Amino acid sequence: MWIAPDLAETVAAIVDEGSFDGAARRLRISPSAVSQRLRALETQIGSVLVVRSRPTRATEAGAVVVRLARQYAVIGHEASVALGHEQRDAMHVPIAVNADSLATWLLPALERVTRDHEVTFELLREDEDRTAALLDSGSALAAITSESRPIAGCSVTPLGSTEYMAVATPAYITKWLPEGVGADVLRRAPLIDFDRSDDIQSDWLRAHGVDPIVPPRHYVPASEDYAAAVRLGMGWGMLPPAQAAASIEAGTLRTLGHPDLTEPLFWQQWNIASPVLTAIRASVVGAARAALDQSRD
């Protein structure tokens, strides 16, 4: 079945912008034209492609069309480059990323790509256990994920493992853990989770025989703010060495002891022949392996 690029682009715009009006502004056409294009494609395919909610979202069939639209955009950009067109739009690359990678090593890797390629990035921040879903839905062209199995149509490259250590301030330890870490005190000691899907603190508690539902907890859903909350003594938390080492050396944070936990990370991206995507992967993989190897050292 042939799907016209402009119709696929319209579905992607509706999903990306969250509304028909937003898609119309992006495509520089009227909202009625957006609706007409969508109805034409839904009639052609025989499936509903967009849930008319606020914001709009793709159905399962719509996600397939969104992925196709991203692929059209990549192929069109590369063709423009190959043909030597001077006036061309930068290639837009949405990437699903986890917060800790974004806060520590990822941005310099992406900046290096912008020196040699006409590219813009849209970073979709999500937990590493859920970034692969954004890749599968067509929302992202690539993802940093804990998922080692390739999403259909994607390649997988290991990045290394992020290490996390349990830390707290000396004042917090004096108040809540004066006699050391044990199951009884950990049940009462406040902890900090990134969000309600963050389970790394829960894994550490289980290793100490504590039901993770029991202790009181704060939720701080931003990597730097999470680290700041731990440094302020609001609770104990798991931090990567890149965010904890300086404070531990200065004596403003202390480790709570083993186990240190690791989260393996992988780079997944669509299998599309693209010099830009190849350059992104090379830069990200190199930066990740250097940063994660250094953190283990």
Image (spheres, grey):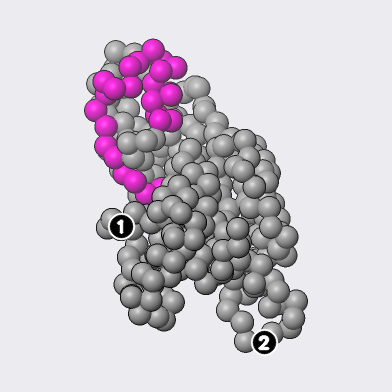
Give coordinates of residue 279: x percent, y percent.
70, 61
- Give 107 or 253, whichever is nearer the viewer: 107
Which region is colored magenta? 199-224
Residue at left offset 43%, top offset 24%? 203
Q: Which is more foreground, mark 2 or mark 1?
A: 1
Tell whether position 82 is magenta.
no
Estimate the spatial distance between the alpha carbons at disc 2 and disc 1, rounded to whole Å.
39 Å
Q: Residue 230: where, in percent of width, then height?
A: 35, 40
Please give left or right for residue 290 compared with residue 257 in the image: right
Q: Is residue 37 above or below residue 143?
A: below
Residue 52 tag number: 1
* Residue corresponding to mark 2: 86
Q: Which residue sits at x=61%, y=66%?
A: 72
The front one of 111 and 59 is 59
| Amino acid identity at mark 2 | Glu
Q: Residue at x 58, y 53 (%)?
A: 142
Amino acid type for the residue under numbered disc 1: Arg
Query: In this rendering, does residue 68 appear at all?
Result: yes
Numbered label attached to residue 89: none
Examine the rendered structure and indicate whether residue 177 appears above or below residue 115.
Answer: above
The foreground one among 4 and 13 is 4
Query: Residue 66 location, x and y as percent?
Result: 50, 58
Quadrant housing the C terminus: top right
* Numbered disc 1: secondary structure: loop
- Residue drawn at point x = 43 percent, y = 30 percent: 200
Asked which secondary structure carries label 2, the reply is: loop
Crowding at dot 1, Cα within 10 Å, few <14 / some 14-19 / many 20+, comes out as: some
Q: Would you place residue 287 above or below residue 183 in this image? A: below
Q: Residues within 10 Å of mark 2 (few under 14, many from 20)?
A: few
